[in-house]
Amino acid sequence: MTKRTLLSICMMMIVWTLSAQITITKQNMPQANDTVRYENVMNPLAFATQVAQDGANQFWVFPTPNASVISMVEYKSSLKTPYAFYFFNTVGQKIADSIGLSQFKLEDVYQFYSSKNSAYSIEGLGFKLNLAPLPLAGNYQTEDKVYEFPLEYGDRDSNNFKVKISIPLIGAYVQTGYRVTQVLGYGKVVVVNDTMECLKVRSDIIGADTFETQLGKFGFPSHKVEYKWLTLEHRHPVVEITGNELAGQFVPTQTKYMALEPKIDTSGGGTTSVPNPAYFDYPLVYPNPSKDKIFKNRIVTDIEGYSMQGTKQEIRWVGDTGYINWRSGVYVLHITKKDGSIERVKMIVAH
């Protein structure tokens, strides 16, 4: 293969990749009266491979776990929440039944969101405290911008936030910090048996919750991390993995995916009986072109790589992730599937 031919192939792949990107805007954000059903995975480490998978033209496959618990997420008009007196024209979401410990426990905790052409932001917080007789709430003095629009691959935004809520006869509750949001990848995501174009977004929320009292200040610092896969088909993340950053490592504490209804197989007149059938219509190995690592479909048992001259190339596997250190060029992959069949696929490596 000539250098001109290789260059032409690379250029065609680049053009195709650019055309596959999506843009998230205000129209793709949650609205009042939305109700979403999620499957909470019992093992929060189940999707560690997908968390590590970044870049352009990716394929994220989320298999149906053996153990999960259903939960519901509801978005309400602020007027239909216990904090209607404090907020107008915002959308409320109950984020926790309780947060904290002992006398500093917050209960019935709501966040209130606004969606504008420029950003999707947290503008208010409401909670109940066992030390206070009435519900407490307040607007952010500096709003927490979750996403800035338009949201596209490669974006990185950083914003400060602050909210201070007075607690009668006690002092105040203060939440301060900053959020860094990065779009780390784009491509396709498979959830249940649905395949969708998506963006993979990571948010780091570094801050502290502080109670200011006559006896002093009691602070609880944290570094929370959220991974979300956003699509145009749904106004809510189809997959969300949250946790904490500890010693430079992400430690997931909750993993959930949208409990989508299985798509109807129009050719057979019903839902397919194959578990997670999207695997069988999916690329056997991806991404292609690649740089330094590849991922294999779960129906693949083995992959061997060869140069165009027939020299076998090393692949170091960690789970379903294969790490490669190959020169730029075209290679042939010998792919063995679970049914014993072998397919040969050409793959481009470009640095």
Image (cartoon, grey):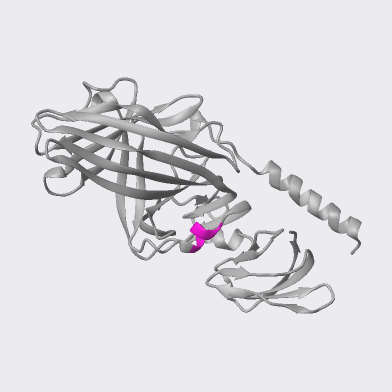
Q: Is residue 269 left or right of residue 110?
A: right
Q: Is residue 170 left or right of residue 15?
A: left
Question: Is residue 332 shown to the viewer in this render?
Answer: yes
Between 247 and 336, the one lying in front of the other is 247
Give above or below for 25 relative to 270. above
> What secondary structure characterizes most of the magenta part?
helix
Question: Is residue 284 shown to the viewer in this render?
Answer: no
- For the N terminus, the quadrant is bottom right
> At 33% from the left edge and 64% from the top edge, which residue is drawn?
67
> At 78% from the left edge and 63% from the top edge, which residue is drawn?
328
Q: Quadrant of residue 252?
A: bottom left
The image shows residue 187 at horizontal and vertical percentages of: 60, 49
The image shows residue 197 at horizontal and vertical percentages of: 58, 45
Give above or below for 251 relative to 157. below
The image shows residue 298 at horizontal and vertical percentages of: 54, 68
Q: Quadrant of residue 317?
A: bottom right
Instruction: Answer whether residue 200 is magenta in the image.
Output: no
Give above or below for 174 relative to 187. above
Between 158 and 269, the one lying in front of the other is 158
> At 56% from the left edge and 32% from the top edge, which residue is drawn?
150
Give above or below for 209 relative to 275. above
Q: Is residue 110 left or right of residue 338?
A: left
Bounds of the magenta segment: 49-53
> At 36% from the left edge and 42% from the top edge, which residue is drawn?
36
The image shows residue 297 at horizontal and vertical percentages of: 58, 66
Between 247 and 109, the one lying in front of the other is 247
Picture mark count: 0
- For the C terminus, the quadrant is bottom right
Q: Is residue 157 left or right of residue 286?
A: left
